[in-house]
Image: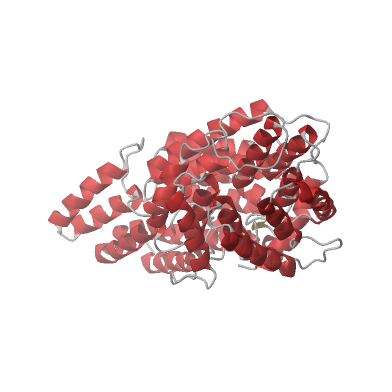
Amino acid sequence: MHIARKLLIVAAALMMVGTQTSPDEDQIAPLLEGMGKHHHAITTKSDRAQRFFDQGLMLSYGFNHREAERSFHEAARLDSTCAMAYWGMALVLGPNINAPMDPHNAPKAYEALQKAIELAPAVSEKEQAYIQALFKRYAPEAGDDRSALDIAYANAMRQLCGKYPEDTDASVLFAEALMDLHPWDYWLKNGEPQPWTPEILSVLESVMQRDLNHPGANHFYIHAVEASHNPERGMTAAQHLENVVPGAGHLVHMPSHIYIRVGNYHEGTLANERAIASDDEYISQCRAQGIYPLTYVPHNHHFLWATATLEGNSAKAIAAAHSTSERVDTQMMRKSGYGTLQHFYVIPMYAHVRFGKWDDILAAPKPDEDLVYPQGVWHYSRGIAFARTGRMPEAERELAVVRKIAKDPVLQQVTIWDINTTQQLMEIAANALAGEIAAAKGEYDNAVAALEAAIEIEDGLTYNEPPDWFFPVRHSLGAVLLEAGRPEQAEHVYRADLTIFPENGWSLYGLKTSLAQQNKQSEAKKVEQRFRDAWAWSDVELTASRF
C-alpha cells in the first residue's frame, strides 16, 4: 500500500469536508441514545460535562470524530475549566487509520491543547500525563510530514500506559497510536505479522482480558486481525461488540469485518442491518457532522450488499446495492480523493451481474462522460449480459470499449482510498469479460487463460473490506472448467476459493458439482449438505457457480 500517497490524496479531500462542517460552538450537542456505559472519570465540576466527555470518547472509538469533537466542545461549554474536554478536542482532530490529519485542523488542535495545558495544574497527575502525551503530537506549524510527531505521541502513550497499567483507555489509545503509524499495514501477504503488529495485539489483548466489553479495544482488535490468516482470532471481539454501544453505528457494523472473513455471512448481514438502523437513528437525533455520513454510513450498505451476496440473498443484496449508490454525493465523487464514492455509485451494476439480471443491466442508463470508471463498469456489465445471452457481436463490441477504458491513465488516479486503483478493477473486468466471451464461443483454452489472468490481478489487490472486486473470478473459472469437461481442475479452483471465502455457497455448489462429475459421490454428498447450510438464507437457485 502506498501510504504516503494515500495520505496526501485523502488529506486533500478532507480539507474540503473540514472547511464545510466545523462544529458550531454555540450549537448545543445532544446526548445521544445508545452510547453504552463506558466511563472515564475526569476532573470537572459538572456531571453533565462528564457525560459529554464520555460520549466524545465513545464517538472517537467509533470513528465518528466530528460528532466527538462537538461533544467535547459541549463539555467545555458546560465547564470551561475542564482540561480534558480540550484534550478531547485535540485528540479527535488528529489522524486515524482511515484518514490523515486535515492540515486545516492543525491550528485548532494546537490551540485546544494549549488551553488544556493552561488548565492542567488543577487536574490529576494522570490527566496531566494524558495532556503532555498528546502535546507531543502537535506543533505550532506542522509540515507536510507528520511522522516524527506521530511517533513521538505513540512513544509518549507507551510511557503513559506503563505508568498507569490499570487504565484501559490509556492502553487502547496507545494501541491506536501505533496503528495510526501504519494504517492498514499489519500483515504481510504470507500471513506473517509486520514488526509492529505483535505489540499492538499484545496491548489490546491485555485490555480485553480485563474488560471484555471495552468498545475501543474490540474495535481496534478487529482491524488489527481481520487481514491476517487467522481472522477467527477476532470472533470474541466481534461478539462482544455487537450490542455494547447500540447507538454507534460503526461499532455495530464492525463485527461484520470478522464474520465475512470466517464465512459467517448471515451474521454479517444482520450486523450491517443493525448498523444501518443505528445510523438512521443517529442522523434523526442530530445534524450529522463531517466525513462520517459521507463515507461510513454508505459503507454499511455496501457491506450489507457484500454479505447478502455471499449468502445468495439477491433481494437484500440488490436493495443494498441501490441504497449504497443512492447515498453517494454525485458532485463529491468527482473530487480528487473520493474515488471510493464512484465505486459505491456503480455497485448496482455489479449486483445485477452477480445475480444475472440481464434485462436490468441492458436497461440501465449510461453514466456521464466524465465518469470514466462508472462508464467502464457499465460497458463491462453490458458485455457480460450480451455474452451470457448469446449476443456475441454486441459482447465483443463492449469488450473493445472496456479494454480501451482499462488503459485510460485517469483510472490510476481514481482509487478506493488509494488502497486499490480502479484501473486494476477494469483490468480484471476486461479479462473476465474476455473469458466469458471465449467460453460462450466454446474456446475454452482461451477462456481459461483470460480468467486466470483476471484472477492473478484479483489476487494481487491489497486487502480491503469488502473486497474491491465484486465477486471472486474463481466462481467464473470453475463454471467454465465444468462446462469444458474439466471437473478435476474445477475442484481445485473451488477449494482454493473456499480458503479465501470460507463456506460460500457459490463455490460449495461448484465443488459439489465437480466432485459428482468425478464420481466422488460420498464427498459430493457431504459438500451438498454444506451447500444447503450455506444457502439457508438464499432466494436463488443455482445451476452453476455464476449466472
Vertically, is 442 above or below 93? below
Is 135 displayed left or right of 394 in the figure?
right
- The residue depicted at 21 percent of the width and 46 percent of the height is 529
Front residue (pair 414, 243): 243
The image shows residue 135 at horizontal and vertical percentages of 76, 59
Quarter of the figure with residue 228: bottom left
The image shows residue 58 at horizontal and vertical percentages of 61, 41
Q: Is residue 145 visible from the viewing direction of this image?
A: yes
- The residue depicted at 73 percent of the width and 40 percent of the height is 72
- The residue depicted at 29 percent of the width and 52 percent of the height is 508
Single out the residue that lies furthest toward the top.
284
Is 157 displayed left or right of 336 in the figure?
left
Q: Is residue 354 visible from the viewing direction of this image?
A: no
Front residue (pair 203, 130): 130
Q: Quadrant of the N terminus?
A: bottom right
The image shows residue 370 at horizontal and vertical percentages of 74, 50
Front residue (pair 345, 142): 142
